[in-house]
Image (spheres, grey):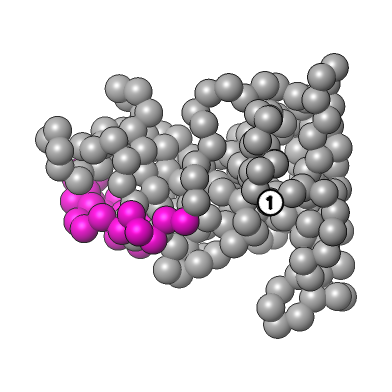
Amino acid sequence: MAEQRVLHVSDPAERENLATFLTRAVRLDPAAVVRIRRRGDRYVSGWVATGFEALAVRTIVGELGVDDVTVGADLVLAGLGSGLPIDLGYSMDSAWRGALPPVDGFAHIDDVPARTLVELAEQGAQLAKEHGSSHGPPASLLDQTVLTVSDADTEVRVPMRVVFALTAMDFIPHSGDKADSRRILPSEIVRVRATNTWLRIDARYGSVARRRAGGISLSPS
């Protein structure tokens, strides 16, 4: 299986985890592609674009016959139901735009109550409803810094588009379609990490990453 485009997820719980992740991605974009990468001997990471100029990732226990491949999310989703190894077919590597963040090198900046981010998303959704158009929320809202976290050495600005991406992928319990910040336990946290060039927010069910510098600025427009 060394050079076959085959994904094998034997654990039913892990199959369900990946299926939930891909269902969200396809809901945001019916033509979504997923970039699947081997991570060590036991793990596989799936990356998708969210539509908010931020990437989402979920890591599961699984086996991948190649190091890195991009395929249609709907193809993987259909194959997960069988429990059998999934033939990933033809690669769609040309459909993937841009680089992925590094696997390592992220510094832990701070932990933030998950409820805070969902409250920000709720406020943002209300503003988007008032000021948006058929093209979606205005860019000025998406690019606005809604949270600033810092440690002794680093200050990280989190824009609304990252918060929207996190809740659109339902990575925080009770943060999806029927979001209700009051149902989120005060003890539920998200972890803000950063490198010089990337911001990453880790929540219970997945992570969202966005380039900090050298690409798209996080500063308000």
Could you tell me which residue is drawn at 65 percent across and 35 percent down? 197
Q: Which residues are the magenta region?
A: 73-97
Indicate whether residue 82 is drawn in magenta. yes
Horizontally, residue 63 falls left or right of residue 31, namely: left
Is 85 inside the magenta-drawn segment? Answer: yes
Give percent across and percent down for residue 156: 79, 34
Residue at 76% over, 70% down: 137
Whether residue 125 is visible here, answered yes or no, is no
- Toward which corner of the image does residue 205 lie, by quadrant? top right
- Residue 35 placed where, x, y %? 39, 48
Mark 1 residue element: loop
Task: Identify the residue under disc 1.
Answer: 216
Give the amino acid type for the residue marked by disc 1 in the picture: Ile
Residue at screen point 49% across, 45% down: 99
| Left or right: residue 74 compared with residue 17 | left
Position of residue 121 relative to residue 130, above or below, is above
Would residue 217 be visible to someone looking at this image?
A: yes
